[in-house]
Image (spheres, rainbow, N blue to C red):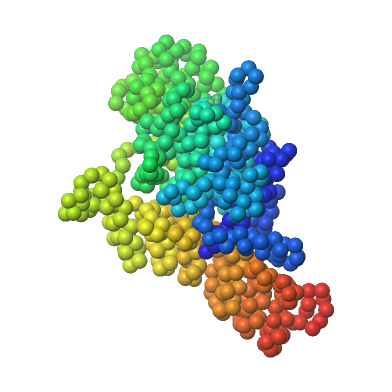
Amino acid sequence: MENSSSDCEDIGSELRGKINGSASHVSVASSLRSVSLSKMGLSTPPKISEKSSLRRNRSYGNMLASGNTEAKVLVIYTGGTIGMMRNEKHALEPIRNALVKNIRRFPHMHDVDYAQERFGSGSTMGPLVLPFVENQQRRVIYTVTEYDPLLDSSNMTINDWVRIAEDIRQSYEFFDGFVILHGTDTLSYTASALSFMLENLGKTVIITGSQIPIFETRTDGKDNFTSALIIAGNYVIPEVTVFFGSKLYRGNRTIKISSASLDAFDSPNVPCLAKIGINVDVDYRLIFRPYTVNRFCVHSILDENVGILRIFPSITTATIKAFLQPPMRGVVLQTFGSGNIPSNRQDMLEALRDASKMGMIIVNCTQCTTGSVCDLYETGRLLQDCGVISGYDMTPEAALTKLAYCLGKEEWSLEEKKKMMQRNLRGELTAGKSPEMQEFDLIDAVARSLHLSTPHELSQLGATLFPAMVNTAVKAGDLAKVELMKSYGADLSTINYDYRTALHVAAAEGREDVVKHLLLHGVTIHVRDRHDRTPLMEAIANDHHEIIRLLIKCGAHLTGSARAIGEFLCASAARGLQKRLESYRLAGADLSQPDPSGRTALHLAALHGFKEIVEYLLQNSVDKDEVDLLGLTAYDYAKQVGHEDICKILNGKHVNGTSH
Ligand SMILES: NC(=O)C[C@H](N)C(=O)O
């Protein structure tokens, strides 16, 4: 299917004025609200009825003929050192409108020639284009939306997290991935909060920033930003992640470890998800996936009555009591070692017990950078008796934002909130042991027989064998074998040489039970294969209606431009494929969407004499009076070729009311 780059251009041109012009500081939520959905060619695709819009759409058609594979990334620029400049006192401060202007001058970040050829604009306006990157499938087209005011992240609040989350929600279907430019100081808090707020996330969200402004000669900003764009555009890692200093981390596992080093972040309790060196090495097995059949949504109610209390020797009861006073509703207690507090401090224990009895959620987290709280010592077990719950190995940032999130879930009872705090929701904690792999490791066995031994050879073997074996089991609908492959260490989300996943195969083959199984195992629905086809497109192309319903329920959406969908609809009608039209309808297409000549599926069905399709389209509210580029209605076509039965159905009324 044709990619939807024109959507990107529409968004780009709409935001362009706001980014570069005088009214530059508008949140993308409000910007996108002002960009009509029909203009983006998605939910309510445009109808072509006026000559001007026709001309516009034709010229888009020419641009799309470039045949390049592109990915669209939305960049939300909130502030931080990355976009700061030195003022007269030599202090760093964010400068409005400077980032995009400067990026346009960096040949490493913006390919002016490509932008010129593709969008007819390049050096001053239009979407930004990342130059071609060796070994990456897609060229990244990105749009930057700049917040007003730009913030040093120390000034950010819960309201800013909500704003970012809402902006992602508003633009979710129009972009392949998201990059958030953010100050480093509170970046881990934002990353943790967003990881909870963005529920059933299916796309890549990366937060990055820098220690040195991007405008300076020696900067980490350019590499961090470019790498984040490449990953967001080319890899589906459905998590809120942090990219910094050559590594991609799970956001809610990160902490800022240095105020000076360019490796400012770490995720001490879990390995990084990807490393950028000469190649991009993603460890797909580490990716945390939503194990539900639900579509993406944002939970934006956070309770701000939460806090972190760090215990220290000789802390007074008065201090503790003061901290636990209403309106406080949730507290992260940072304790010693593996979760200990002084066992000889009955006063302290009493204060905690009282607060817990009053309905406060108190979560025990360690002051150590690595490791977890556990009931190894009497001093730790005592806290449990007071109603304090375990935060396992959560970072204080993750525990605090998770508390704000859980307390904001009004539909959950207090017990449920406590249960959720101790459950692994987004990969933020490790409770208990991870499932064991089968003793007989398939890849090891094959590797031995092939005399392969290096870790690189082993991972290459796995990457080659597993997709083929999983896909064979999926094609056969053999769920037991799919499970077996998983126990051998296969990642069900893995892609083959054609960038296809098991979900593509299951959707194409009509294996509804396998589709369900894969979705429940977190296989992402947004991966596009070499030919830009998503699992949803596979289900449509094979008319598997139940699977289309399932994928849509899970948040899948059409990815082609409105015009391309119009072409598909017309082609289906011309070939008498009513089932295919129904497939598109179930997938959310507007059956009235015209092709570039302004003809709708109804014109084509009338022309080719498919009476049932004409009836079907009329039942689905396709306007019989729509005229094409030549000013002809569906009736005119039917009349011309003598389909009298269809003329009768279309009842001869012209758009302006004159009878034929
Ligand atoms: N490196 C940075 O971005 C630090 C800056 N103070 C901020 O958090 O906004």
Q: How far across and down, in percent of the image, does residue 187 sit?
A: 51, 31
- Answer above or below: position of 599 versus 503: below
* 403 relative to 515 in the view: left or right: right
Residue furthest toward the front?
A: 113
Let me know if residue 159 appears in the view. Answer: no
* 169 relative to 624 in the view: left or right: left
* 656 relative to 90 in the view: left or right: right
Residue at 20% of width from left, 49% of height from top?
Answer: 452
Asked which quadrant contains residue 576, the reply is bottom right
Q: How far across and down, in percent of the image, does residue 390 sit?
A: 39, 31
> Quadrant location of ligand 1?
top right
> Quick one: 455 or 288, which is closer to the camera?
455
- Answer above or below: position of 630 versus 518: below
Let me know if residue 469 appears in the view. Answer: yes
Residue at 46% of width from left, 37% of height from top?
Answer: 243
What is the quadrant of the C terminus in the image? bottom right
Q: How far across and down, in percent of the image, does residue 251 sit?
A: 46, 36
- Answer above or below: position of 188 versus 638: above
- Answer above or below: position of 639 versus 308: below
* 296 relative to 53 in the view: left or right: left
> Quick one: 203 or 594, which is closer to the camera?
594
Residue at 51% of width from left, 38% of height from top?
Answer: 225
> Quick one: 615 or 130, which is closer to the camera?
130
Figure disc tally: 0
Q: How far across and down, in percent of the image, does residue 21 sit?
A: 71, 40
Residue at 64% of width from left, 34% of height from top?
Answer: 98
